[in-house]
Image: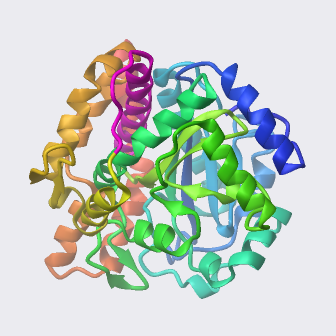
Amino acid sequence: MGETPKIADPLEALEAARALFDSADDFTVGVEEEFAILDPGTLDMTAGFERFDQAARTGPLAGMVAGELIRSEVEVRTGRCETFPEAADAMARRRLDLLDVAETLGYALAATGTHPFARWQDQAVIDTPHYHLVEATLRYVAWRNNTFGIHVHTGIRGADRAIAVSSALRSVLPELLAASCSSPWLEDRHTHLHSTRTQVFTKFFPRCGIPDPLADWEEYAEFVRFLISTRSIREHTEIWWSVRPHQSFPTVEVRICDAQPEFSRAVALSGLMTALTAHFARAYDEGRSLPAHPHRLIEENFWRAIRWGMAGELIDLDTGAVMPARERVGALVEEVSEVAAELGIARYLGVLEEPTAAELYVARLAEGESVRDVWPHAVARTRESVAEWLAVREGETR
């Protein structure tokens, strides 16, 4: 994304953010994918971010690589894209370029929500002032967060509108999570959770998971001012909600999904997050009611998504009906079909009908394979799947 110059004073940054939202462009897209850096022989996590950072300072990845807490993790960004198809193509180029850098440096990469056997005790925090502060504040909570996800930023014009859209997106976070589950393992164990990442991250970190609904920008700003005045946070990025207004870009950022070994699913999930954000913005503009379910009800679906993913059931919070998770996700895809077609997203969404990575891996684990038996498949698909996607795209454009 095109991040604005950082304002050191967090209260000044908060005031500036409102003006940024009020002049923002609708439905721009930026996607961030997080990867575990691996030793190619053992497929264990290994420190390497600094070498990626150095290698990516020039060439196609310049400005597009970032660190995320630990030295054995690397994030790649699309930057700001004006349309979703542009973002999808950028995601493919960035992932492939990052994989090429990894190979040159002697590493492998993997995109799943958690690593199946790497020890959190062996991971070191990257050497930046921000993450040293995070570590100093959170200690054990930060050390345990060896998790990997996809974050999608969608431009929304209007500060109050951005808050309304963020609040509406709360209700569909469980469906998005269920469709993304890729982490049924941790600490050399099959956890029997489809998204171990979400249980670790959202239940450990403060100011995380599903936020309360907010009426408007002023209510959001009042909370940020409270956190700053009580010395609870130093800057707004220490609010780690699963959906949040991002003050620097300015966008609505959805942060709920596990990282994806299958690239086509990473694109589909990014597309669905973008389409839902645009759909709720349009509903707001037209005066239609937006989802406003109580936190306690969304949490019931959230747990179901963490535990069973797309293999389980979710609740239609409007009717109370319990239905297969795949049916609930399908209903969301149908709900956003008009805006998805308009924004060039619809053709990417069909893959969401296919099994998630967690479903595939849980089936193999149930047959008696260990997490170490299954892990090489996830590593291989991180590269193979983007090459396959690009081959299909090339065929479509001929």
Which colour scheme appears in the figure? Answer: rainbow
Residue 138 in sight: yes
Is residue 278 magenta-colored? yes
Looking at the picture, tell me which residue is in the foreground, 362 or 252. Answer: 252
- Residue 81 drawn at (x, y percent): 59, 24
Q: Residue at x 82, y 68 (%)?
A: 127
Q: Is residue 281 above or below residue 323?
A: above
- The C terminus, quarter of image: top left
- Residue 200 drawn at (x, y percent): 46, 74
Magenta stretch: helix, strand or loop mostly? helix
Q: Is 124 placed left or right of 231 in the picture?
A: left
Looking at the picture, tell me which residue is in the foreground, 40 or 35. Answer: 35
Q: Is residue 82 above or below residue 224?
A: above
Looking at the picture, tell me which residue is in the foreground, 155 or 31. Answer: 155
Segment colored magenta:
263-292
Is residue 337 magenta-colored? no
Q: Residue at x 58, y 30 (%)?
A: 160
- Say how many tags the image has: 0
- Residue 76 drawn at (x, y percent): 62, 46
- The N terminus, quarter of image: top right
Q: Is 166 placed left or right of 271 in the picture?
A: right
Q: Is 374 placed left or right of 252 in the picture?
A: left
Q: Residue at x 22, y 43 (%)?
A: 329
Q: Is 316 placed left or right of 173 in the picture?
A: left
- Residue 72 drawn at (x, y percent): 64, 69
Quadrant for residue 52, please give it.
bottom right
Q: Is residue 343 above or below residue 193?
A: above
Residue located farthest toward the right when viewing the structure as drawn: 8
Residue 96 in sight: no
